[in-house]
Amino acid sequence: MALFGRRKKRQEEAEEPVVEVQKLPDPPAPTINGMRSMADHRDYLLSLVEPLPPFGQNLLEAQGLALCEDIVSTIELPGFDNSSMDGYAVRCADVAEAAEDNPIDLPVAGEIAAGDGDIPQLAVGTAVKIMTGAPIPDGADAVIPYEGTNRGTDRVRIMVSATPGLHIRRRGEDIAAGTLLMNDGDQLGPRNIGLLAGVGIDKVLARPRPRVVVLSTGSELVQPGSPLTGGGQVYDSNSYLLAAAAKAAGALVYRVGLVSDDREEIKQTISDQMVRADLIVSSGGVSQGDYDLVKSVMPELGLTDFCQVAMQPGKPQGFGLIGEDDEERVPMIMVPGNPVSAFVSFEAFVRPVIRKLMGVEPYVRPTERAFTTHVIRSVKNKTQLARALVTTDPGGRRTVELVGGHGSHLLGDLSKANALILLGPDVETVTAGQPIAYWPLNDG
């Protein structure tokens, strides 16, 4: 035994626990001139968010949302044999010889309207007046429309013959009980809503619309409708542009008032919005300028990632998970302040994230192709997203031409465009008449 034992530490001298510094998962490595590729950055953001949890919602509230259940009909549609025309229910045998020059008169034994529940049996040699959607009486096997009769009340003159099943909608001919109507993951559209309502379904399990808070930063910004009082002031277009784009993508949008270039105001505004946000989108303050304060403030609010993406426009990008609690952190995407850069960034990154939160695939717009009308030049080593106008000729051939210049401030040109041309980092020139990929912009 050792002569002197190791001295025990007193309580106050106990080693402090090691606190693990939290950070975002490692981002993708730069691949192009020290910059991150557009696809890598988008995939990284998508990896950091999860679809929102589903809950039961009324049909109309769920329009455009992704289902989280298979839906099976429990009833038949139609639920009973019914008439597809206003006319007379008859037995085919009773009118087999009817014609314009050989009319057959039958007594009218009653009348059936849509919704009637007490349906008489049709006796041989009689007719029953019947309205569209009304149940077919037992014994009848055809409906003669008004156009083939004299529309008699007590007796009706039939001037056309009939074949079994004429103008009768058969029970279950549209939907049989047990039919799978929609699959888990399907997006609920107007026609789906009509179908589900038709089989008696009023609620579905679906992911909600993401609550997206949109804000613009910059002391130079002025609310539209207010006068410009200084030479350096400009109207805020970004928050309107991004809010409208988020709404078109299916989000529930909250547009926040302007935020000046003040550190504490930026922090307080973002902190205040977390309670009602599933996603925060800001524009401005992420570049290299002295007044780009969002970039310097955000690390104080949560886990952040700022990078340069090999794309034009939209090179400076930021992302954060804001808040201290892992379970309550809110994702935030920070895009550049120039209007076109902000919109292109929305299409490239924000829209896919919104769709993932909704659980609606595909997350990224499917590309389409059109033929160029003239030479298009691009910047090597950057993905170019150029504003363009796509037109379709009478033969179905689509052509595309650039709209305006490449400036990231040109709102007029952006408003005229209906597509974004996609030119990869290895593309420098596309000759006239060549096919080129683009994102269509007029479908939300």
Image (cartoon, rainbow, N blue to C red):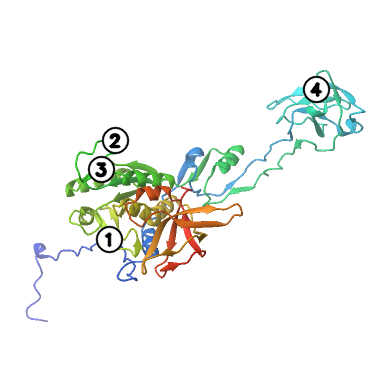
Circle 2 or circle 3, nearest the eye: 2
Answer with left or right where residue 11 lies relative to residue 127. left
Q: Is residue 171 something one can see in this rendering? A: yes
Q: Which mark is residue 151?
A: 4
Q: Is residue 363 visible?
A: no
Give the alpha-carbon distance from disc 3 to disc 1, as whole Å: 22 Å
- x then y, percent, for residue 67: 51, 48
SS class, disc 1: strand
Distance of label 4 from label 2 (alpha carbons):
64 Å
Image quadrant holding the N terminus, namely bottom left
| Disc number placed over residue 225 in the picture, else none | 2
Is residue 45 found left or right of 192 in the rendered image? left
* Pointer 2 with pointer 3, Cβ within 8 A: no
Distance CA(mark 1)–CA(mark 4):
78 Å
The tag on residue 306 is 1
Of the numbered discs 4 and 3, the one sitting upstream in the chain is 4
Inter-mark Cα distance, 2 to 3: 13 Å
The front one of 322 and 395 is: 395
Rendered view: 377 above or below 189 = below
Q: Residue at x 73, y 27 (%)?
A: 131
Q: Nearer the viewer, mark 3 or mark 1?
A: 3
Q: For the residue marked with disc 1, what is the amino acid? A: Phe
Q: Residue at x 34, y 65 (%)?
A: 310
Q: Secondary structure at mark 3?
A: loop
Closer to the chain start, of discs 4 and 2, is 4
Q: Which residue is mark 3?
A: 258
Mark 4: secondary structure: loop
Q: Residue 31 placed where, x, y %?
A: 34, 71
Residue 140 sits in quarter: top right
Please name which of the two marks, 4 or 2, marks the residue nearer to the observer.
Answer: 2
